[in-house]
Amino acid sequence: MRAFEYVLAGTIPDAARALELAGAVVKGGGIDLVDRLKSRTIVPSRLVGVDRVAGLADIRVEGDALMVGAAVRIAALAEHAEVARRLPALAAAARDAATPQVRAMATVAGNVLQRPRCWYFRSALEACPKRGDAVPCPAIPGRHEYGAIFANTKCAAVHPSSLAVPLLALGAQLRVTGPAGERAIPFDALFVGPDVDILREHSLALGEVATAIQVALPAGVASAYAECRHRQSSDWPLATCAVAGRRTADGALSDVRVVLGAVAGVPHRALAAERELLGKRIDPALAARVAEAALEGATPLPLNRYKLAIVRAVVAEAVTALAPL
Amino acid sequence: MARHTLELGFAGDKKAVDIEVADGTPVPWGLDTPHTEVGERIPRVEARDKVTGRAKYTYDINLPGLLHARVLVSPHPCARVESIDATAALAMSGVRAVSLATDPDWPVGRQIKHEGQEVAAVAADSIDIAADALERIVVRYAVEPHVTDEVAALAPGAPQVHERTPGNTDAGRGQQQGDRDAAFAASSKKIEETYRTQVQNHTALEPHGSVAHWEGDRLTVWCSTQGTFSVLDNLARHFKIPQDKIVVLCHHMGGGFGAKFGAAGCDRLAVLLAKRTGKPVKLMYHRREEHLLGGNRPSSRQTLGVGATAEGEITYVDVDTSGAVGVAGSARCATPIIYRYRAANKRERNVYLHTPASCAFRAPGHPQGVFAFEMAIDELALALGLDPLAMRRKNDPNPVRAAQYALGAEKFEWATRYNKAPGAGGPLVRGIGVAATQWGQLGGPGTEAMVRVHADGKVEVFSGAQDIGTGTRTAMAILTAEELGLAAHAVASHIGDTRWPVGTASGGSRTLPSLGPAVREAAHNARAKLLAIVGSELGAPVSELSLAGGHVVRAGKRVCTWAEACARIPKATGRIDAVGARQADIAPYQRTVAGVQFAEVEVDLRTGVVRCTRVLAIQDCGTVINRLAAESQIAGGVIGGLAYALFEDRVLDPRSGRMLNADLEWYKLPGMRDTPEITAIAFDVSNGANTCGIAGLGEPTTIPTASAIGNAIANATGVRVRSLPFTPDKVQAAIDARRSR
Amino acid sequence: MNDGPLRDGLSRRDFLKTVGVAAAVGAAVAPPPAAADPAPITVLGPGPVPVALEVNGAVRNLHVEPRTTLLDVLRDTLDLTGAKKVCDHGACGACTVLVDGAPYVSCMALAVDCAGKKIRTVEGLATGDTLTPLQEAFVRCDALQCGFCTPGMVMSGTALLERCPKATADEIRHGLSGNLCRCGTYAQILAAVQSVAGAAGGR
């Protein structure tokens, strides 16, 4: 890490003001940021710590919405009884993310807004278009076995967030505060793929700070999450899937969403899979059809074709978990 | 000289050997020797220091005025350093000294032939300042073409790694035994398959490194090493320091696995920077550097042909191997042909690349060679329609393994589980597999030890050698206690200090088979001195006295307590010092140790993800000194083998040649959720190689695991994956290939 | 959470210097408030700043740079070298300490962020020569070889058992899955933690 100056903000407005300095960055749990500071792939002038902002680490149910403070630790989310009861997909993703230590330190907002773990992006030795170097993505002709199988012509990095996958499936919103005031960004509009802007993965404006994640809790909401790892201890998943919707009387789901993780530069909504799943009674045969549909548009690279089968497996598993008893 | 009949082997195969025992030397232990401490389950004597954080490793040494150093390494696999400008770094506050590859006294290589070669080092007031300084050192490289891929290296026109190895390979070595043509002709079943293994990095948790401290012309070096004496010798030669002016210390070390024998670049640079600054300097490799400079096991590409008669008698074994060693090393695949055979034909060669040098790694050559061989034997058995375990039992002449196969078959329920292990249901299928191995190192002379008995009854045992993690201190205490009739925890062990008696480097599983008998002899000599004192006071012949249960015993009766005996040591000296040495081998029961492992896996047929669920490892380890530590060693070897089988792989960018996963995030080591249920059986064999019958076991236990897992995958899925590691892509591809047939 | 695109950190930083945005150096100093500021923002660093850390029950008053990790302060300043630096990347768990009871990889925590929190290291577990039941179990079960991962394992196990005294085998595997051991002592570590959890009534 190069030296930087540090502001421990007491309030969100303080944090927003401290962020006005060019090159200032927000620090939450620091798991993503400190790693990039250490590799010196980021050299900010100032860190603005938001950990001491009052109320930022609270989980509350407000009416029919769950409000998860931006600085809530992943471990706290995983252990929250109401989350486990009403949003099992979110609880499951939180429970198995990273390691116990990282879950204790990392914040939910930091998890959602973290930058890719791509080994080219994370190495100061490698030129990478995502860091602004005028080169094509080195992973595409290089090593991309853990890389994207969708929308991967400009960049093969996958979005690393485990929580973003169920949150997008659940139609969550990210609440942010910035120079222009407060706003809520639907997760549908939060993520930015490499085809739109290779330099970032989210749509927060400069100086905006995440304050909370809001998840609606409509009656009958059902969700499930599945992931596949190579190594069972502390590994990045090869693919994840969250399915969410509302149960209908006939054993089907309405308002259904199928989201895939670790397969694209953003959490990937599998729209064809959603169409296949919508309104149909769930059984193993349907799960298999949904899993196949989830691959629509996939453009695997030579070393990651194996991910197709893994996506099929996690989609089928998540869908099957929502079958009527 | 006295004649003595030594009973060797184990219950299933006893062998009596007549030997001569020199006067005053300990009578070798045999199968029938009773023990009180040896073979018990004794917690490590240093365990309390390790669980409280009190154990000080090299990385933990803090001294007044200590400077922290970092190395700058080449990002290029092949280059020449044209110039280095460290002006800006030296101008930084807190930077105390630099050493550059362009300096006349640069203590490391200058030619850059792999990524990670050191080009500069900085000593500074803090580790952060040292890292800042590295960024300010400007190195101008003349970058030259490189080759880091084995296939590309052998292609015409490839960049040449060394002038002496045109075509990036050597002449190779060949070996032939028996009449291969006749054996081939006699075979009713033949298979030929190619197997591949990956490069595996040692990845010791404590990196290489030293703390160097000069006081005048005397040098003290704390070094994370598996060879304190070799480090001393290396440093003395390199820096032309008189050997009596150097002390090398290693009280605890965080893993070596074969890569920490001599003084590495970081160790020399620490000494140089300490000299230059006049202050103590700590230089430990950072994790990326440790991956690049901390050693690796060569890859292998092995084509095996094996044949058998219709009855399953193995006829011939053809082995053709090559392996990428990097800039240096040996890719020799040890293929110990543990079965009867008529003819064998081996060819092997090294391939040189612009990648870091490979070196000895836990059972050098064996995990790769045995992986291929034990897979091929399995394939041959299945091709013959034979049970793979029955095939091994039929062909294996070793009586120890015969007993181990029988024990394992029963404990692992082979007959009821092979081909029919119940799966967890759905896409998850289970299977079991077996693999066998041998190891051939029983230590040797050149190691000494000292036992000190104080007048107040305290006992200490000393060796200048180090503990690589196997429990050397505890074994020394057990052996001393056994000889003196005391409890192991009554003995204080001191190791890792070159001022103490010379000891072997910890490699080849030879530490305890070398050190143990020296300790026993030292304790035996201390015993004789003490009994002589007691005997002269009592007027009893020494030959009638012995030590047992904390007492001096004569004719079955306790004469006095240990403390009373020690109190008779003359006050003028107040203690007894006795040295002992490892003598030449006596009469080994076998020159090799035998092991068999069984593995169970669960394979997800959809994803290709493999989980190893159970392992049974049965290992001949000679006379077991500490059963607790022996079982830990066996289980640890299994985890190492499992890591090799399922996870570890060095990933290089095909264009830049740089390592992409030089961390512990993408260089995957297994964790607790990947750990199978392990049953470790330390299989006692009295081998008679030395006075304690000790055989080492650090290495053999890691050899057969990968092939047992591979054979279990084949049993679970019906498909053979012939390439390590068994990652989901390869397992899927093998399953798909069968489906499409 | 939002660092925006940063094309070249170095040149950005140099830019800051040229336009004269003063970085506060040395002890905590507030920059002159901008015209619109209702209250000044306290800027720490980039040089050493005063930090009070409560480590194993004792408050230590230190001067550390904001960039200095908790691990480096523990090891290099306080000589508490039980926590080890292995991957320096948050991936191996060898540097695990407890911060307000939660297991932290201290290589990824900034020391300044830990001010006011209760830090416990492996050196703070035993009372005199009396080990904790988990430490005793590690000794008894031979749950260590070279011992370099051991302090981190002990701390992760301690954190788990404090939260979940009767942890099951699966919970133990889950709770210790962030700690790597190269010697391969996992089976013995599992047995050690199980023996303590079992004594507390767990399975």
Image (tube, coloured by chain):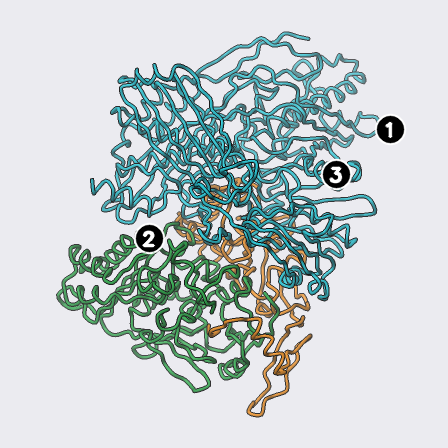
Chain colours: A green, B cyan, C orange
Q: Position of residue B471 (x, y in %)?
A: 59, 36
Camera sees residue B56: no
Residue occupying the far right of the picture: B572
Q: Mark 3 = which residue?
A: B236
The crowding category of the residue bearing disc 2, from other C-alpha atoms within 10 Å (few below 14, some 14 to 19, many at least 20), is some
- When the figure is inspected, residue B230 is found, relative to residue C106, above or below; the finding is above
Left or right of residue B545, residue B406 in this image: left
Mark 1 or 2, closer to the camera: 2
Residue A215 vs residue B290, the one in the foreground: B290
The crowding category of the residue bearing disc 1, from other C-alpha atoms within 10 Å (few below 14, some 14 to 19, many at least 20), is few
Mark 3–mark 1 distance (CA, rounded to whole Å): 37 Å
- Circle 2: residue type: Pro
For label 1, the SS is loop
Residue B157 vs residue B273, the one in the foreground: B157
Q: Position of residue B552 (x, y in %)?
A: 70, 21
Mark 3–mark 2 distance (CA, rounded to whole Å): 52 Å
Q: Earlier in the sequence, mark 3 or mark 1?
A: 3
Does mark 2 fall on the same chain as mark 1? no
Residue occupying the far bottom of the picture: C35
Left or right of residue C53, residue C154 in this image: left
Residue B372 vs residue C169, the one in the foreground: B372
Question: Residue B572 shows which numbered tag?
Answer: 1
- Circle 3: residue type: Ala
Q: Position of residue C95 (x, y in %)?
A: 56, 55
